[in-house]
């Protein structure tokens, strides 16, 4: 099973600052199958980034994804008040006997 | 508008059963694999099960294999999750999601399942 480890677990920043969130995989992940989601309290997750670096429909360009192999990054260039939420990375990979989809444990982005 | 609406959650006793439903609209349902993802209170996301477009192939997380059954009715644009032998640790918000190239691009609003005596 591919384990995704996100860091930091929580991050306190102010609006206007830059946020850098990390997702590290226990094995190499195809960049085609690495995604990032945002979840606000009481809401379902929302797809932000797919294919490691492509923004989903309607996602502002202050959100960007990068990385390959085992190390991936979500960057929010200038934080807006509505960006404070929990962020999850997720991968898909066909491995015999293992779940094809796994999520990281999340990074909570808090207002400082 | 592309939309998924989850329903069927509630309070059930340990050992009991529950059937969740997800109603899809705004897209050709049979063209997409569909998935259930759950989230226990205060925790992260956990993939539960996935079904392919025509319902001929299903995939489960090992801990739920044999207890949970995912199915679909493409004529009704609906996805289901039959949950049997429920345990306290199955208490969670259950979301249906549309799968597209290994990611989940559309999510339902979730339906809460509480397993407690």
Image (cartoon, rainbow, N blue to C red):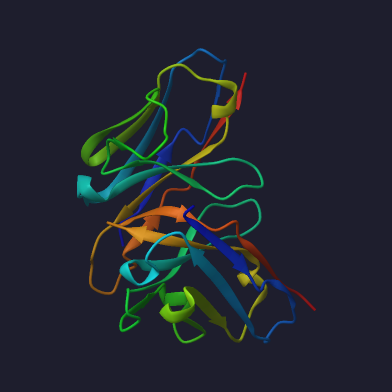
Q: Is residue B71 visible?
A: no
Tally of numbered tags: 0
Against A39, is A98 above or below? below
- Is residue A29 toward the left or the right of residue A102 in the image? left
Against A17, is B48 above or below? below
Q: Nearer the viewer, residue B86 or B30?
A: B30
Instruction: Tell me which corner region of the image, top left, top right, bottom left or bottom right, holds residue B71.
Output: bottom left
Image point 64% across, 78% down: which residue? B87
Q: Residue A56: x percent and y percent?
A: 36, 40
Against A49, is A110 above or below? above
Image point 36% across, 49% down: which residue? A4
Q: Nearer the viewer, residue B66 or B112?
A: B112
Q: Residue furthest top?
A: A16
Q: Residue A70: x percent and y percent?
A: 24, 43
Image point 34% across, 45% down: which residue? A35
Against B64, is A95 above or below? above
Instruction: Tell me which corner region of the image, top left, top right, bottom left or bottom right, holds residue A89.
Output: top left
Quadrant, the C terminus of chain A? top right
């Amino acid at each position: 099973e591919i384990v995704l480890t996100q860091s930091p677990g929580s991050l306190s920043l102010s609006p206007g600052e830059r946020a850098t969130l990390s997702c590290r995989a226990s094995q190499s992940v195809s960049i085609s199958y690495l995604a990032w989601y945002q979840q606000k309290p009481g809401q379902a997750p929302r797809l932000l980034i797919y294919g490691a670096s492509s923004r989903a429909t309607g996602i502002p360009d202050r959100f960007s994804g990068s990385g390959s192999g085992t190390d991936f990054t979500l960057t929010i260039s200038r934080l807006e008040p509505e960006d404070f939420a929990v962020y999850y990375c997720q991968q898909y990979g066909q491995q015999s006997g293992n779940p094809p989809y796994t999520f990281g444990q999340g990074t909570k982005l808090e207002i400082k | 508008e592309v939309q998924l609406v989850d329903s069927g959650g509630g309070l059930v006793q340990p050992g009991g059963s529950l059937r969740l439903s997800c109603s899809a609209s705004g897209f050709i349902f049979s063209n997409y694999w569909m998935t259930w993802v759950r989230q226990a209170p205060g925790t992260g996301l956990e993939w539960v099960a996935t079904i392919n477009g025509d319902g001929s192939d299903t995939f489960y997380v090992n801990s739920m294999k044999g207890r949970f059954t995912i199915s679909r009715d493409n004529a009704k644009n609906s996805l289901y999750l039959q949950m049997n032998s429920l345990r306290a640790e199955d208490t969670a918000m259950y979301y249906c999601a549309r799968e597209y190239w290994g990611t989940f691009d559309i999510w339902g609003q979730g339906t809460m399942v509480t397993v407690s005596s």
